[in-house]
Amino acid sequence: MVTTQLVAQVNCPPHLPLTLLGNTDYCVGSDGSQLSINESYIGYEWLPTSQTDQSVLLTAGNYSVVVTHYTGCTDTMTFQVNQVANPPQPTIDVSGPTQFCHGESVVLSVPTWYPYYEWNTGSISDEITIFESGTYVVSIEDWIGCSSSSVSVQITVDPLPTAAFSPNLNMFDIEFNNLSYDATSYEWNFGDGTTSIDFEPTHTFTTNDTLEMYLVAFNNCGSDTAFLGLESVGIEERTKEAFFSVYPNPNDGNFSIEIKSKTNASMVVSIYNSVGQAVFNEALGSGLGVAKIQAGNLADGIYLLAVRSENRVHTTLLSIKK
């Protein structure tokens, strides 16, 4: 019996397919370069390390990777890994003052030679327009992926003033509650030729008439105005051009209010005693009509009856005599 031994000879090519994936430059502050071989082989040897995986993390230095084909053929690639500096810290350019009034704006920008920008607002443009108060920072990234962040810029937007007030009725004396905000000074015009710059003035109205009064609130950004219509009638009933009438008057605390002027707004009836305390409140519906008021528990005396509708207060004196 004759035995034949066959010996196969493998002729390895000069070079195996060998592609290094990843960036051999990495940024200061990162762990290193994440690299891998694109092709699949049965063996990898990253020198001078002892790593044998297809993918490795390497820091700065000179390296070789040896791959082994299933036929036993090998090939080697040499390369260098470098640590590179992050880009210089960007400087935010501010197009105007960093403090301004509501309704105005300022543009923040950085140099345009970077491929990627990100502001803490979420914008990825090299400039943004700011309308609101806040702290603003931009991060830039170079072509390698290294990044740097700017020093923050603080923007302050001053609000416009808002004028608001409400009257506290005490017979013909009215104490005004100042409900304005974001204001630094005030000017009251009571509609009868008198004014005040007090924060919360008290004013005595000496005429029976319809008056348009207003409050102007100021700050360094501007002003705002709130209006209030006041109507006062005497102890005798006045029906001509009056908003409402009361009958009978005097009465025992039970009386009727007839709304004379057309309105779609809801109304509130209030009765105030001689020291300005509200001793009766009742909500009325809207529109023309007659409302029955039952305030028989009030003691004899002179009261101020007020009907509030939208931004107007209409008043008359009420006499209770049992």
Image (tube, grey):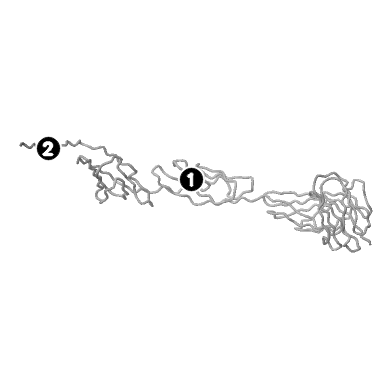
**Residue 201 location, x and y as percent?**
79, 58
Of the 4 image quadrants, the one containing the C terminus is: bottom right
Element carrying mark 2:
loop
Name the residue furthest front: 1
What's under tag 1, amino acid-wise? Glu
Q: Is residue 242 left or right of residue 60?
A: right
**Residue 70 location, x and y as percent?**
22, 41
Q: Earlier in the sequence, mark 1 or mark 2?
A: 2
The circle drawn on residue 192 is none
> Which label sits in the foreground, 1 or 2?
2
**At 31% from the left edge and 48% from the top edge, which residue is drawn?**
56
**Residue 122 location, x and y as percent?**
51, 45
Q: Could you say which quadrant of the image residue 1 lies in?
A: top left
> Badge 2 local density, few (<14 within 10 Å), some, or many (20+)?
few
Q: Is residue 131 left or right of residue 302?
A: left
**Residue 208 location, x and y as percent?**
90, 52
Figure check: 94 above or below 276: above
> Badge 1 local density, few (<14 within 10 Å), some, or many (20+)?
some
Q: Nearer the viewer, residue 174 or 87?
A: 174
Q: Which residue is mark 1?
A: 118
Q: Nearer the viewer, residue 5 or 267?
A: 5
Spatial CA distance of label 1 from label 2 is 64 Å
Element carrying mark 1:
strand
Q: Nearer the viewer, residue 312 or 144?
A: 312
**At 38% from the left edge and 51% from the top edge, which residue is drawn?**
30
The circle drawn on residue 7 is 2
Figure check: 94 above or below 250: above
